[in-house]
Amino acid sequence: MSVKKISSPTEGFQIVYQEARNATVAAEKLEPLLQLLENSPTEGPSPIELLQEVLESILTSQRLLHQSVLELHQKVDAIRSTKRV
């Protein structure tokens, strides 16, 4: 919210109302995300835990891929250095 000179009490009330309305709309948009955080122990892992597992799997595979690329670069560098001699 920007700072603005308020010319009348009605304008001030309108600004406050609009900001409160915007906050309500933002909270309503966050509702589905907040529901993901609710714990339901009888239903198994929460959606957040499932998402975390997927992201951890992606991260692990990316690390392995990165390590493989580094190893390939080392092999290529070794081959280049033996051919230069």
Image (cartoon, rainbow, N blue to C red):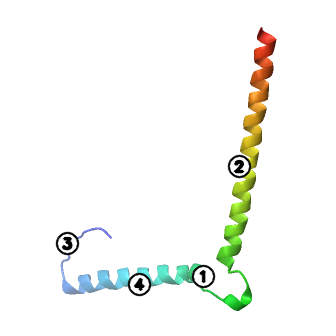
Point out the image quarter for the N terminus. Answer: bottom left
Which label belongs to residue 3? none
Q: Position of residue 34 (x, y in %)?
A: 56, 82
Give the secondary structure at mark 3: loop
> Left or right: where does residue 31 sit relative to residue 75?
left
Residue 84 at x, y percent in the picture: 77, 10
Query: In the rendered structure, which disc, 1 or 4, sits on the residue that comes first in sequence?
Result: 4
Q: Residue under label 1, please give it.
A: 32
Q: Which mark is residue 63?
A: 2
Amino acid carrying mark 4 in the image: Arg
Give the spatial CA distance, label 3 vs label 2.
55 Å
Graded by Cα atoms within 10 Å as few (under 14), some (14 to 19) or many (20 or more), the crowding at tag 4 reads few
Tell which tag, 3 or 2, sits nearer the viewer.
2
Residue depicted at 20% across the width and 76% down the height: 6
Residue 21 numbered mark, or none:
4
- Residue 26: x and y in percent read 48, 79
| For discs 2 and 1, the disc positioned in front in the rendered view | 2
* Farthest-out residue, top: 85
58 above or below 45?
above
Mark nearer the N terminus (4 vs 3): 3
Kindly report the distance in space between the C-alpha atoms of the residues bearing marks 2 and 1: 32 Å
Label 1 vs label 4: CA separation? 19 Å
Pick the quarter of the image with the C terminus: top right
Cα–Cα span, label 2 and label 4:
45 Å
Q: Position of residue 42 (x, y in %)?
A: 71, 91
Q: Secondary structure at mark 2?
A: helix
Label 4: state its secondary structure: helix
- Which mark identifies residue 5? 3
Circle 1: residue type = Pro
| Amino acid beneath label 3 | Lys
